[in-house]
Image: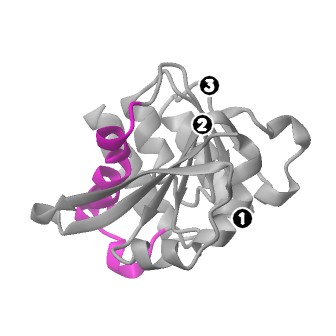
Amino acid sequence: MISKLLVYSDLILEWNERIHLVSKNDANTDRILRHIIDSLSVFKVIDVPKDAMVMDLGSGAGFPIIPMKIVREDIKPTLIESTHKKVLFLRKTTEVLKLRDIDIIDLRAEHLPDDFYCRFDLVTVRALGKLPIILNLSFPFLRIGGILAIYKGKGVEKELKNSLIFHSWQIHDIAKIEIPEINISRSLLIIKRIR
């Protein structure tokens, strides 16, 4: 696992010289490893079932789903990314790391066909925008009982207060993730689809 995570980090740095995957501030091994650890924090908060169908909206450089797949080979991820160069990076990464049972879709979430609806146990979202947009995009894809995990900063309570939560959603948890040794301080908003 560790060797695959390090290879993944190297791939990001290599490709970042050609396409924008991470900011200039994050374009070093220490910062990439920080993103990897942050990505894996979802496992401390959610008991992801074996063989779970997982969708990641706006996959970008592959956070959080590539680290999750490396650590939990049983999950079956679908990565949604509309920027073609990033899709090429994700495909090359899954090939180099020999990741199986992973789909990479070169489309915007709102253009996905109906057979993606009500199919996923878990939808992950990281750095995709404001909460109302995330909720509208995510809703169709979760099965009833499915979980939406949104990686957010410290101001999530205020954002939540100003957002309309549908009757079909239930706020399950707002988990605080604090890892001072590597300067991680964030919230993981966990919402369950109940109907």
Residue under the image location 29 percent in, 68 percent down: 28
Mark 2 is on which residue type?
Gly
Residue in the foreground of this view, choosing between 191 and 90? 191
- What is the CA distance from the residue labelled 1 to the residue labelled 2? 27 Å
Q: Label 1, secondary structure: give it.
A: loop
- What is the CA distance from the residue labelled 2 to the residue labelled 3? 20 Å
Residue pushed farthest left? Answer: 181
Whether the magenta-drawn stretch holds residue 61 is answered as no
Q: Which residues are magenta?
A: 22-47
Residue under the image location 53 percent in, 44 percent down: 93
Residue under the image location 71 percent in, 51 percent down: 139
Mark 3 is on which residue type?
Asp
Mark 1, residue position? 83
Q: Label 2, secondary structure: give it.
A: strand
Mark 3, residue position? 101
Residue under the image location 74 percent in, 61 percent down: 82
Residue 146, label in figure? 2
Q: Main secondary structure of the magenta part?
A: helix
| Residue 81 appears in view | no
Whether the magenta-drawn stretch holds residue 42 is answered as yes
